[in-house]
Image (tube, grey):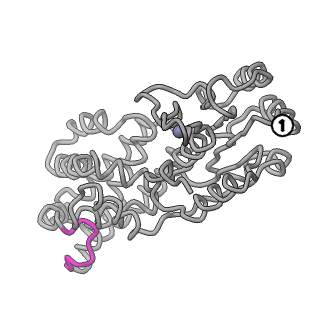
């Protein structure tokens, strides 16, 4: 069986096998729902599956097809990806699909629509999609992606074959990173802190180590700088939503390490063992309860960022709190 399309997917073996089996036995469903955390590999898998379905490479001619040899940055004409525009997937976007649906595939064997973020369909868009799912043309496959199955209309859910993406074991992520040139220790650290989310691990392996160093640097700055300088750090940290969540998580890791170091002084318990000296310096003047309060606040902040709170104000609060916790303890009078 041709497995090359899935070569770059980290983990999710059962899902891969299920899709390959369905393909091999001619039992591909008309609609799939892939559910799982952000960056866990849903879109990558959907795209790999779509390309496998589209492959028209002729065994006799030996010519490679468009699905296999797609030029970089170019989309396959029969694989359409729909993303939320702003906060929602709108009716007009679904109508575009509706209009396109009756036309036969242009280059491939099928027409594949990948809808990423179906929990964000407006009510009208969801109803319109539902109608298409009821009786799609034989050559159409829908792949719906969601981070939250509970927000998807049950009527949509019932028309899809549901595949649930689970966290990938750290060993699998580390092995992939090592195979792709990551050093042993770095691979282990990145895999451990990725929470089983391959996309996050890849991001960290590429630029994240640098990002982590920047984060530690920000904390060091906050520790030493005057309160007036806090706003420079806020400006630095206040980026795109996705980036903010990663930065926040990295800060939580460092603060967690500060906490563990302060409480135990045991290097072996740290996530970022390679930064022990910097962690030790950061916690030098901090109090345990201040660090604990800070850690709790970071966890709460994540929820608030997800809830679309004003990110600038949140960063201000976090940075001032960090400064407070790391700076020299005030003499009690
Ligand atoms: Zn091909």
Q: Quadrant of residue 312?
A: top left
Q: Is residue 308 visible?
A: no
- 181 displayed left or right of 196: left
Q: What residue is disc 1 on?
A: 130
Disc 1 crowd, CA 10 A, few/some/many (<14, 14-19, 20+): some
Across and down, in percent, residue 255 comes to: 30, 61
Magenta stretch holds residue 266: yes
Q: State left or right for residue 274 relative to residue 144.
A: left
Q: Which residues are magenta?
A: 265-273
Q: Camera-side residue: 64 or 326?
A: 64
The quadrant of the image that shows the C terminus is bottom left
Residue 262 falls within the magenta-colored stretch: no
Image coords of residue 331 (percent x, y):
17, 64
Q: Is residue 42 above or below residue 69?
A: below
Horizontal arrangement in the rendering, residue 81 relative to residue 295 (left or right): right
Coordinates of residue 39 in the picture (x, y in percent): 49, 49
Nearer-the-camera pick, 303 or 323? 303
Who's the residue at 37% across and 42% down the image? Answer: 315
SS at mark 1 in the image: helix
Residue at point 41% right, 55% down? Answer: 298
Question: What residue is rendered at 19% in x and 65% in y?
Answer: 283
For the N terminus, the image quarter is bottom right
Q: Position of residue 87 (x, y in %)?
A: 61, 31
Residue at disc 1, CB closer than 8 Å to ligand 1: no
Residue 234 or residue 196, whichever sits in front? 196
Question: Of all residues shown, which one is farthest toward the front?
Answer: 60
């Amino acid at each position: 069986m041709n497995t090359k399309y899935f070569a770059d997917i980290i983990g999710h073996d059962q899902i891969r096998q299920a899709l390959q089996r369905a393909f091999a036995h001619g039992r591909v469903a008309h609609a799939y729902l892939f559910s799982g955390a952000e960056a866990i590999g849903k879109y990558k898998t959907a795209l790999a599956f779509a390309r496998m379905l589209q492959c028209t490479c002729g065994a006799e001619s030996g010519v490679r097809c468009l699905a296999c040899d797609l030029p970089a940055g170019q989309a396959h004409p029969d694989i359409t990806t729909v993303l939320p525009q702003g906060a929602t997937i709108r009716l007009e976007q679904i109508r575009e699909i509706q209009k396109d649906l009756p036309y036969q595939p242009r280059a491939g064997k099928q027409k594949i629509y990948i809808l990423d973020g179906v929990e964000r369909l407006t009510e009208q868009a969801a109803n319109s999609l539902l109608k298409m799912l009821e009786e799609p043309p034989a050559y159409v496959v829908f792949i719906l992606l969601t981070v939250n199955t509970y927000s998807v209309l049950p009527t949509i859910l019932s028309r899809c074959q549901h595949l649930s993406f689970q966290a990938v074991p750290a060993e699998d992520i580390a092995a992939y990173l090592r195979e792709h040139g990551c050093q042993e220790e770095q691979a282990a650290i990145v895999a451990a802190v990725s929470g089983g989310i391959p996309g996050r691990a890849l991001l960290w392996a590429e630029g994240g180590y640098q990002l982590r160093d920047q984060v530690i640097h920000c904390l060091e700055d906050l520790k030493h700088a005057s309160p007036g300088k806090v706003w420079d750090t806020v400006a630095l940290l206040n980026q795109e939503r996705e980036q903010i969540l990663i930065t926040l998580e990295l800060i939580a890791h460092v603060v967690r390490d500060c906490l563990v170091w302060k409480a135990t002084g045991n290097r072996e318990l740290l996530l970022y063992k390679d930064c022990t000296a910097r962690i030790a310096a950061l916690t030098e003047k901090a109090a345990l309860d201040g660090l604990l309060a800070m850690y709790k606040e970071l966890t709460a902040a994540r929820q608030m960022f997800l809830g679309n709170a004003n990110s600038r104000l949140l960063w201000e609060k976090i940075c001032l709190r960090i400064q407070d916790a790391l700076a020299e303890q005030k003499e009690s009078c």
